[in-house]
Image (tube, rainbow, N blue to C red):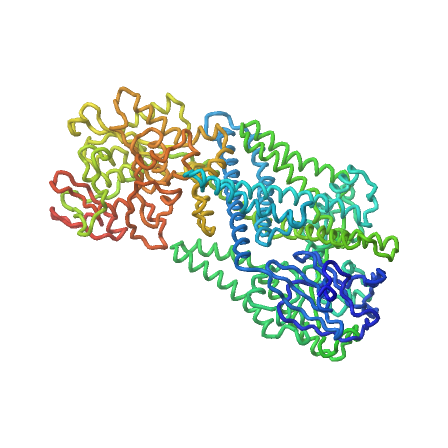
Amino acid sequence: MADNEEEGKQPPLDSEEGNADPEEEIVVEQEAEAEATADEIAPTEDPEEGVVEEAPDDVAPSQELVVQPLKFRDHHSLKGPSSRLMFQRRRYQVYPQRNSEFVLQHDRRTGTITARQGKDGSIGLSGLRFLYATVAMFMMGFLFVFCLQLLLFLFLGLVSGSGLTSDQDFDYSQFYGTLASIPLFVYSLACALALATAFVGDAWNGSPFLDSSTKWKGFKMQWINFSIYLGIPMMVAIISLFARTDSWWFYTAITWYSCVFALYCLFCVLVVYYEINGTMELIVKYKGYQEVNENSSFWDLLKYTLRLRQVQRYSGRTTVRYLVDGSMVVDARDSLRRDHDNQAFRGMALDTKTHESCYCKLTKWKKWQDWGWVEDTKDIRQFSIDETRDVAPFVTSDTWSLEKMYCRSRKKKFIAVLNGPNALRPEQLLSSFVCALIGNLMVILFLTAFLIWFEVNAWTILFAIVVVIILMWSSVYQTINMYRTLKSQREQDQNDQTKKKTDQDYYDEDNCNEIIYEVTEYYRINKITPKVGWTLLVLEVIFFYVWPVIALFVIGNYPIAVLFLITGIISLVRHYFNAASVLMEVGDMNILDEEITKQKASKAHVVSARTEEVIEEDFYEKSRLNLIVGKISHGNRRNVWIVTFAVFVGIFCILFVGAYQIGSSEGGGAIPQFLPPQDFQYEKTEALPYPTCRMSSDISIPGLEDTALMDFVYLSYVAYTSSTYDSTKAPMNTTQEYLDAWFGPSLAIDQFNIVAKYRAENKVNSAVEFKLITFDKKQLPPEFNQTGFAVISIRGTNNGWDALSDAQLWSAAWLAQAVRFLLPFGEIWNPILESLIYVISQIQTTALKKVAYYQATTDFVNYVNRTSEFNTNNNNLRLTGHSLGGGLAAITGSQTGVPAIALSGPNNMLSRRTFDPSLSKHALNTQVFNIVPDKDPVPRIDDLGELYQRINCTANDSNFVDCHSSDRSLCEIMTKCGTQIPDDKIVRPILCKCHSKYEYAKPKQVGGNTTYDEYCVA
């Protein structure tokens, strides 16, 4: 075997020495789908003499192609460099894939090349890669949570720091300075998530980027990956188990997360380094830049790079699109050149279209040149990123699929085969066109059906449809235009029987495929002058970086200011040292081929001993830059994250503007229509009622144990009312009238004067609203005649400030739950979720924490307890609230030890450590009771404690938002628990809307002559 097998890097594949015949027929037998691609014909090499025979560099379209012996060269789009082997007297070119390998087998005796795919994976390997990628996705998920929290706290700090929630003067400079930080923040966070997305993909593919980007290439980096993803966490688990620690999984999970996050940071550092290094190297090696070369100083390169970026950004460009016949040989830098006298290039172009943007037309204004701001240039060719990466796929009858064509980005180029044995069939072209139209139509119909199911009004539906059509129109137009072009070109080629075929010596006449592809060219028609470029650069840095940093520090938003200081510098460096901008000028990554470049420059023909090593390193260099430019810095990933964060910024802006315009209203409204309690009643359901319909005396209002559940629900509803009468808002009833309608005259008293006194004495500027409701001592059981009894009812979300407070307190927990839900086996991370949420909360400023709603409610409870006027304590004081009010009641109750009964309130188990003081699990499990309606999403925020009562919601699934309604929940409890206690001493009035609106059964009439319809209709 040793005589027949030769491993390692071998000379490129070639026919037998002396037998290289350009006219020899080459047969390719495809045994499996080939994922790897063979690039351009490389320089030929004699394995014995080591002599390189260079193929011609420039081949004019009119010249006959001279075919060289078959060679293979690795393209930078491959997963890794290929290996050249000799086995059983056959040459093999092996291309590594993720869990397989693509092999080209060359039998020199027959001249046959066989393509096959070998499996090099297993279930165990796939399981490990899945595990690695899952942990990386969990890290990315919490990075996303962190980024959203950062933007949220930036807005909240903007609100509090600029004086919008207090009596201090409004600070315009700080306000607009903080606003100016948003663009750079969004860009920075989007780049961080784009890097995280690439990191997850790298983990799934076996970390090829990390493996090729460090000095620990090969087995060393593999051991590092294994240690981080599995080895170190496993050792922590083993040690913890040997120590019999109950929290062994907590230590394991937190170590696992920390290790992967550290590896992600290394990934980011390497990307930034190679992006900057690639930018510099491209500038140095490109011969078109006369101002710089390999001997230029760092500062010269720096100045040239910055100037080039500004020219790219602000100069006017013209776009030219045309179709090219694939039978023509075109070098990467050949183009139409807009030279109408060039007959060769005129013959190549089909269906030429020229477009100038509005900005381009603006730059052509003659005044700019008169002022010395812009200067005309000869049309300078600019290249697209896809063009420089050279990754356009071939679309044949075999590679075509309906899903591929529909899901393909309309901006991505492809090469279509129109004639020949592999040509796209007419039905395939038609199917692509029809599928695109049907797909877009189905999206519109689905959106319409969903909005109708969601019971949205007609005008909103019409507006949504118009917006979607506008967004889709460009894609639909491009699809129609492409279909027409390809169809007409196919018919033209088929009808043109006299068309000449080029390179007939190379192509088999019976198997020739006619190809057509679209070329998009950009031409810079002018450029800004250096002084304008430097001026704009200074303004950009000052306005988007320096001013926001100063504003954030001045308003005291130190955590976010430090983060902006660091991420802003990194983002600015990546923005100005942009490899994509240089590639748009250069147009070809192959100038990075160091050894070949040197040989061509020196006309040397002898391959040095280090040639293979240098070529391999050049491959890694181009492969890294291809990944960075195509998928991280300039790809769809970054754009998707920018749009995502922009949407959230828009939501925060809407909440902010709405809160500022509407302000914090106390609430109000007319008393709901009640039926007389002596005439109408709901009896207890025959089935088992809710076990908490009746509460014990240590929770319920004294003497009202049998109606405790519905009493607390009603009191949470009362928090939305106004304590004072306002004739401008008539018809409106005061809180006291609401209380009298439910409990009877004078039993429950609204102590609004005490609340007003507390706010004035303590200068409370918080927008949170709450009521202090006391009960007449004389009507309470004897044991409460001295101490009395009181309930603090906290209002739920009622305006924009309240919505921002919701987001401040619970958005991190809700997003963490979403990450846990979306990830496979997400529940395994439960032990560390609250720790991660706590770390995220630390980017809040101290001033922002002080204005949190719960700070005011907790302080008010302490104020009431120490006020001699009421003589209350934790035994005769209760907290209640609905929605936001319920969550605040739970927080305050856990901090003060006062029992809290919440209706549809968010929970606090995951976020308990983010509050000041933090909440204990014991307090949440013993002091807080939450009523959870079915389908209501709000009480599913954060994890539930041990005390809760689920109740039914009869609303349709499409109207699940109505399950959050407090009066619907009150009707549900009334129908299940009954409105009259057994001894007939106490009854509660029934809402008319229980039947008329929520479609519960009509209550039983037990007295009076007026029917339900007469009461409720009237």
Residue 244 at what x, y percent from top left? 42, 39
Residue 11 at what x, y percent from top left? 78, 61
Q: Quadrant of residue 368?
A: top right
Q: Is residue 281 visible?
A: yes
Q: Is residue 148 visible?
A: no
Quarter holding the N terminus is bottom right
Residue at the front extreme of this rendering:
2
Residue 800 vertical position relative to residue 358 in the rendered view, above or below: above
Residue 868 at what x, y percent from top left? 27, 19
Residue 732 vertical position relative to residue 471 in the rendered view, above or below: above
Q: Quadrant of residue 865?
A: top left
Residue at the right extreme of this rendering:
603
In percent of the image, x 19 and y 37: which residue is there? 705
* Badge count: 0
Residue at the top extreme of this rendering:
868
Residue 202 at what x, y percent from top left? 60, 51
In percent of the image, x 15 and y 50: which residue is there? 1004
